[in-house]
Amino acid sequence: MHCLWCDEEQVPEVVWTTVLAPRKEKVVCEACASQFSVLQGSQCPRCARPMEKAEICSDCIRWQEQSAALKRNVSVYEYNNWMKDVIAKWKYRGDYVLVGLFKDQIVSSFTHAFPSKEAFLVPIPLSEERLAERGFNQALAIAECLDLPIEQALSRINSEKQSKKTRADRMRSTNPFQVILPIKQPVILVDDIYTTGRTLQFAAEALVREGCPRVEAFTLVRG
């Protein structure tokens, strides 16, 4: 088995326990796995921003004044330089299989944060143009790692690239989402990166307007 990231061959150690009960093959070597920084320690309870104390951050205080649609976000990893490179190759160069690098940690972090099985997963959609460019929706790829029903309940009205916008531009944006399948049960939005939270707030507002009782979010990375 070769590491999905560096392609280094992994030679498993053979001991009696692995003969009697074969271990699950690892898709990432230990050296590469050590570069991923799982979010730990004190965080804002609403957006997962690392904090000195576990208290609501200034951004979320402002969000509460504007909209209460999104209740909280849970993220898996910090957005360090290693993760930037991984995301760039996975997301922008269409290397779908790299989702395997994160799958086990996605499942572990999600199960800890969302023990209930009553919610629907709603991946943040791409525009048709972006989907054609990338070949897959990274948010859907994350959702497919999890054992909950997935509903593609949203469509994107415009195709502007969020990665090309400044923070101020994102905050001034108009809602790019419309609901194509109203959901009357709790929803967990799924996306790759939480930056300002604007995208997820817009998606939550659209769902709540159509009768969704509660919206939370799960993201791979906290930017």
Image: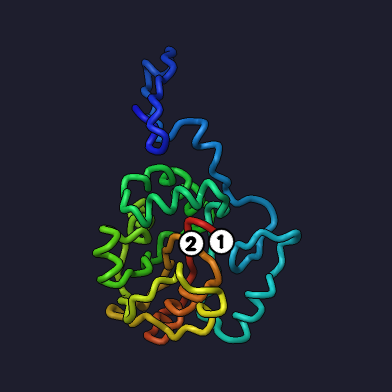
Could you tell me which secondary element the residue under label 2 belongs to? strand
Q: Which coloring applies here?
A: rainbow
Viewer can see residue 29: yes
**198 shown above or below 81:** below
Q: Position of residue 32 (x, y in %)?
A: 49, 36
Q: Callout 1: few (<14), some (14-19), or many (20+) C-alpha neighbours within 10 Å?
A: some
Quadrant including the N terminus? top left
Q: Quadrant of residue 210?
A: bottom left
Residue type for callout 1: Gly
The Cα–Cα distance between marks 2 and 1, rounded to whole angstroms, is 6 Å
Q: Report if residue 115 is visible in the image.
A: no
Q: What percent of the width, then of the height, locates residue 144?
A: 33, 54
The answer to whether the residues at label 2 and label 1 have Cβ atoms under 8 Å apart is yes
| Sooner in the amino-acid sequence: mark 2 or mark 1 | 2
Please state which amino acid type lies under the numbered disc 2: Ile
Look at the numbered disc 1 and give the secondary structure of its residue. Answer: loop
- Residue 25's place in the image compared with 68, above or below, is above
Q: Residues within 10 Å of mark 2 (few under 14, many from 20)?
A: many
* Residue annotated with mark 2: 193
> Which residue is pictured at 49% across the width and 77% down the height?
201
Give the image location of residue 140, x and y in percent.
Answer: 33, 60
Which quadrant of the structure image shows residue 175?
bottom left
Q: From what the image shows, is residue 173 above or below residue 223?
A: below
Screen quadrant of the C terminus: bottom right
> Toward the viewer: 30 or 172?
172
Where is residue 63 shown, x and y percent of the image? 60, 80
Tell me the number on the disc at residue 223: 1
- Is 208 rendered above or below residue 190? below
- Could you tell me which residue is drawn at 45 percent across and 82 percent down? 205
Identified at 28% across, 80% down, the residue is 180
Q: Nearer the viewer, residue 97 or 8?
A: 8
What is the total number of numbered labels drawn onto the structure image?
2
